[in-house]
Image: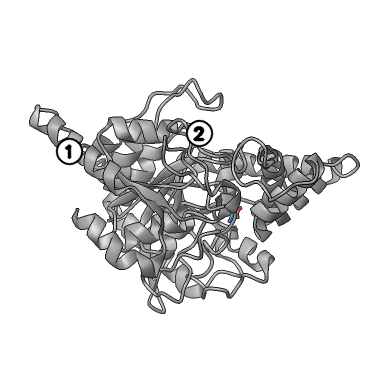
Amino acid sequence: TALLARIAALDPQLNSFITVTADQALAQAAAADARRAAGESGALLGAPIAHKDLFCTEGVLTTCASKILHNFKAPYDATVVAKLAAAGTVSLGKLNMDEFAMGSANESSHYGAVKNPWNLERVPGGSSGGSAAAVAARLIPAATGTDTGGSIRQPAALTNLTGLKPTYGRVSRWGMIAYASSLDQGGPIARSAEDCALLLAGMAGFDAKDSTCVDVPVDDYLAELNQPLAGLRIGLPREYFGAGLDSRIAAAVLAVVEELKKLGASVKEISLPNTQHAIPAYYVIAPAEASSNLSRFDGVRFGYRCENPVNLEDLYKRSRGEGFGAEVQRRIMVGTYALSAGYYDAYYLKAQKIRRLIKNDFVAAFDEVDLIVGPTTPNPAWKLGEKSSDPVSAYLEDIYTITANLAGVPGLSMPAGFVDGLPIGVQLLAPYFQEARLLNVAHQYQ
Ligand code: GLN
């Protein structure tokens, strides 16, 4: 009840929630109390959270922050939602985001931009901007997010939080509305590595309903938090400290590295030579997959339908033209173009080859080091509206985060201080399925 009151009081300024599910939350809280009274324990039992509005929730609106799904109530829960509910979490509602998770500023939502609680004139990052703003403003202690090219790590960095993108296949994507299926991964945003560990433990694991979910055992994230860091080999990729990076962020990252050295880590420079090709490759692959995934929103089966269609083609065209926002339409056009006969080899196939080279860069680097450390973003949070007319300048902000999605490796962003009064983040990257190492290092530092 205290949090519901806090949401009612503060969220009108932040706009972090699309739907608040007060009744359901009170019922879930009562059920958690009853389980506790019956002798059950567990850190997530009764823990308040909220979900990014692309996780399907039975009987509750799931909009993807799009007009085209403004009235969509899923008939089932996403695996992540069901698992966290079974662990006893209390969901307070659904969080604002960039429309269909396309963006880095949370300005493309049909429900309006989200504000950064540290400075209401700045963006909170995206696409999980509602998740980050709600946690940073202490409306909820933790939230789910998704990360296709940085959408958990980047908003966490810009709001002074810890956010984890797991290895591709670690967390089930079933019931998570797809943006780019080969890159999308759900994960936690919270105030500390410890809270992320608790939430990830509740989310991770094999799910037969997602054919890309991998059947490897889930580590005991909580137990691993206290491992000493002695002997940890850290790599600093030279490509992550070049032109374009705010020198104050570079200094903050190096200060974190100094602390990790004091905890027993050794540091060396490494190279991820194909980093420069990541943005063009990502902005071909992600829109290509999006154009295919979003073809199901046709005005017939669910969601928005235009008024008085004169025939089927008119129905498709106007429902999609009126239902999707500008950024989503741009991506659909780019993706359809890249996949069309005659251009496929030049763009999509080429991007896939770059993707493989980026993956090989990481595999080679992790032969030499156990952990890669660098900045999460090149700059602190920008002003609302500053980049909305220049999508390419927003795309360039993704340079340090998208490589992890292209390669599938896990990544974590944790707070690294402030620049001009705005939070910034340091990013840790680890080999496949080594989420425990990321959480361990972040916890030791924090
Ligand atoms: N900013 C990137 C994009 O717009 C990443 C978004 C995400 O991770 N969902 O595609």
Report the amino acid beneath label 2. Answer: Arg
Q: Residue 227: horizontal and vertical position, in percent?
A: 26, 40
Q: Is mark 1 within 8 Å of ligand 1?
A: no
The image quadrant that residue 243 belongs to is: bottom right
Callout 1 crowding tier (Cα within 10 Å): few <14, some 14–19, many ≥20: some
Q: Is mark 2 within 8 Å of ligand 1?
A: no
* Residue at the (22%, 44%) spot, across then down: 26
Q: Secondary structure at mark 1?
A: helix
The scheme the figure's colours follow is: one colour
* Residue at the (45%, 44%) spot, across then down: 61
Whether residue 334 sits left or right of residue 217 in the image: it is right
The image quadrant that residue 221 belongs to is: top left
Q: Nearer the viewer, mark 2 or mark 1?
A: 1
Q: As displayed, is residue 433 above or below residue 211?
A: below
Tell me which numbered mark, 2 or 1, is placed earlier along the sequence.
1
Report the amino acid beneath label 1. Answer: Ala
- Number of marks in picture: 2
Q: As displayed, is residue 218 above or below residue 190?
A: above
Q: Which mark is residue 173?
A: 2
Callout 2 crowding tier (Cα within 10 Å): few <14, some 14–19, many ≥20: many
Whether residue 141 sits left or right of residue 154 in the image: it is left
Q: Residue 52: horizontal and vertical position, in percent?
A: 44, 48
**What's the distance in space between the residues labelled 2 and 1, CA to CA?**
29 Å
Residue 364 in view here = no
Residue nearest the viewer, comparing 302 with 273 = 302
* Residue at the (52%, 46%) spot, across then down: 71
